[in-house]
Amino acid sequence: MAESYRCNGEWIHFSNTACQELQLAWAKIAGAHDLDPAMKELSRALRKASEYAAGAAAIGIDDEYLDEPFSEKPVKEAWLRVMELLIQEICIGGPVAKGMDVNWSSDIKHSWIERLTKMQDCLSQQIET
Protein backbone atom coordinates (compact mmCIF):
# COMPACT_ATOMS: atom_id res chain seq x y z
CA MET A 1 0.00 0.00 0.00
CA ALA A 2 1.14 3.56 -0.62
CA GLU A 3 0.49 7.01 0.71
CA SER A 4 0.08 9.81 -1.80
CA TYR A 5 0.64 13.53 -1.41
CA ARG A 6 -1.23 15.78 -3.85
CA CYS A 7 1.06 18.52 -5.22
CA ASN A 8 0.18 20.80 -8.14
CA GLY A 9 -2.40 18.28 -9.31
CA GLU A 10 0.17 15.46 -9.30
CA TRP A 11 0.31 12.50 -6.93
CA ILE A 12 3.61 11.92 -5.14
CA HIS A 13 3.79 8.42 -3.71
CA PHE A 14 5.61 6.94 -0.72
CA SER A 15 5.10 3.55 0.88
CA ASN A 16 3.09 3.58 4.12
CA THR A 17 6.25 3.09 6.16
CA ALA A 18 8.13 5.75 4.21
CA CYS A 19 5.26 8.20 4.73
CA GLN A 20 5.34 7.63 8.46
CA GLU A 21 9.13 7.98 8.55
CA LEU A 22 8.92 11.15 6.47
CA GLN A 23 6.34 12.79 8.71
CA LEU A 24 8.15 11.81 11.89
CA ALA A 25 11.42 13.19 10.45
CA TRP A 26 9.67 16.46 9.57
CA ALA A 27 8.17 16.55 13.07
CA LYS A 28 11.58 15.93 14.65
CA ILE A 29 13.18 18.74 12.66
CA ALA A 30 10.30 21.12 13.44
CA GLY A 31 10.39 20.11 17.10
CA ALA A 32 14.07 21.07 17.28
CA HIS A 33 12.96 24.62 16.42
CA ASP A 34 10.02 24.75 18.83
CA LEU A 35 10.74 28.29 20.02
CA ASP A 36 9.07 29.29 16.74
CA PRO A 37 5.29 28.91 17.31
CA ALA A 38 4.69 27.81 13.70
CA MET A 39 7.36 25.12 14.00
CA LYS A 40 5.85 23.92 17.27
CA GLU A 41 2.39 23.70 15.68
CA LEU A 42 3.80 21.97 12.61
CA SER A 43 5.60 19.38 14.74
CA ARG A 44 2.43 18.65 16.72
CA ALA A 45 0.29 18.35 13.58
CA LEU A 46 2.79 16.10 11.78
CA ARG A 47 3.05 13.75 14.75
CA LYS A 48 -0.73 13.54 14.90
CA ALA A 49 -0.99 12.88 11.14
CA SER A 50 1.63 10.11 11.35
CA GLU A 51 -0.61 8.25 13.83
CA TYR A 52 -3.40 7.68 11.27
CA ALA A 53 -3.92 4.21 9.89
CA ALA A 54 -1.99 3.08 6.83
CA GLY A 55 -3.42 4.69 3.74
CA ALA A 56 -4.73 7.76 5.58
CA ALA A 57 -1.64 9.51 6.92
CA ALA A 58 -0.48 11.52 3.90
CA ILE A 59 -1.27 15.21 3.85
CA GLY A 60 -2.49 16.89 0.67
CA ILE A 61 -0.21 19.79 -0.15
CA ASP A 62 -2.43 21.45 -2.75
CA ASP A 63 -4.48 24.19 -1.07
CA GLU A 64 -7.81 22.42 -1.53
CA TYR A 65 -6.51 19.44 0.44
CA LEU A 66 -4.82 21.32 3.28
CA ASP A 67 -6.58 21.38 6.62
CA GLU A 68 -5.63 23.54 9.57
CA PRO A 69 -2.99 24.04 10.76
CA PHE A 70 -1.25 23.09 7.49
CA SER A 71 -3.22 25.72 5.54
CA GLU A 72 -1.98 28.60 7.70
CA LYS A 73 0.75 30.66 6.01
CA PRO A 74 3.23 30.63 8.95
CA VAL A 75 2.91 26.84 9.19
CA LYS A 76 3.39 26.49 5.41
CA GLU A 77 6.53 28.63 5.68
CA ALA A 78 7.79 26.50 8.57
CA TRP A 79 7.03 23.32 6.62
CA LEU A 80 8.96 24.65 3.64
CA ARG A 81 12.00 25.26 5.88
CA VAL A 82 11.64 21.76 7.36
CA MET A 83 11.50 20.21 3.88
CA GLU A 84 14.73 21.98 2.95
CA LEU A 85 16.41 20.85 6.16
CA LEU A 86 15.38 17.24 5.56
CA ILE A 87 16.73 17.35 1.99
CA GLN A 88 20.04 18.60 3.44
CA GLU A 89 19.97 15.81 6.05
CA ILE A 90 19.44 13.18 3.36
CA CYS A 91 22.22 14.62 1.17
CA ILE A 92 24.82 14.61 3.94
CA GLY A 93 23.58 11.57 5.85
CA GLY A 94 22.80 13.69 8.90
CA PRO A 95 21.45 12.37 12.20
CA VAL A 96 17.76 12.78 11.34
CA ALA A 97 18.18 10.87 8.07
CA LYS A 98 20.27 8.19 9.80
CA GLY A 99 17.55 7.79 12.42
CA MET A 100 14.91 7.02 9.80
CA ASP A 101 14.01 3.41 8.99
CA VAL A 102 15.11 3.86 5.37
CA ASN A 103 17.86 2.01 3.51
CA TRP A 104 19.61 5.06 2.04
CA SER A 105 21.02 3.58 -1.16
CA SER A 106 22.01 6.08 -3.82
CA ASP A 107 18.82 5.38 -5.80
CA ILE A 108 16.58 5.83 -2.77
CA LYS A 109 18.34 9.08 -1.79
CA HIS A 110 17.84 10.41 -5.32
CA SER A 111 14.19 9.32 -5.38
CA TRP A 112 13.40 10.93 -2.02
CA ILE A 113 15.19 14.16 -2.89
CA GLU A 114 13.33 14.34 -6.21
CA ARG A 115 9.94 13.83 -4.55
CA LEU A 116 10.69 16.18 -1.66
CA THR A 117 11.83 18.86 -4.11
CA LYS A 118 8.52 18.56 -5.98
CA MET A 119 6.66 18.91 -2.70
CA GLN A 120 8.82 21.87 -1.74
CA ASP A 121 8.16 23.58 -5.09
CA CYS A 122 4.41 23.09 -4.68
CA LEU A 123 4.38 24.55 -1.19
CA SER A 124 6.61 27.43 -2.24
CA GLN A 125 4.22 28.37 -5.07
CA GLN A 126 1.30 28.40 -2.63
CA ILE A 127 3.14 30.70 -0.24
CA GLU A 128 3.96 33.12 -3.04
CA THR A 129 0.32 33.41 -4.17
Image (spheres, helix red, strand yellow):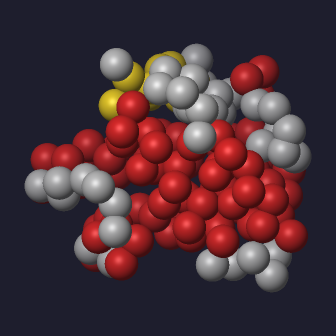
For residue 103, above or below residue 10: below
Check the picture and name the quadrant holding the C terminus: top right
Q: Is residue 37 left or right of residue 59?
A: right
- Could you tell me how many numbered marks the image carries? 0
Q: Is residue 51 left or right of residue 55?
A: right
Q: Residue 79, located in which quarter of the rendered image?
A: bottom right
Q: Is residue 104 left or right of residue 124?
A: left
In-front residue for pair 127/67: 67
Q: Position of residue 101 (x, y in %)?
A: 29, 55
Q: Position of residue 116 (x, y in %)?
A: 44, 47
Residue drawn at (34%, 51%), measured in percent from left and top? 113
Residue drawn at (34%, 31%), measured in percent from left and top? 15
For residue 15, above or below residue 29: above
Q: Residue 109, located in which quarter of the rendered image?
A: bottom left
In-front residue for pair 50/108: 50
Residue drawn at (68%, 45%), measured in percent from left and top? 48
For residue 77, above or below residue 52: below
Q: Residue 33, located in which quarter of the rendered image?
A: bottom right
Check the picture and name the quadrant holding the N terminus: top left
Q: Position of residue 54 (x, y in %)?
A: 47, 26
Q: Position of residue 67 (x, y in %)?
A: 81, 32
In-front residue for pair 86/28: 28
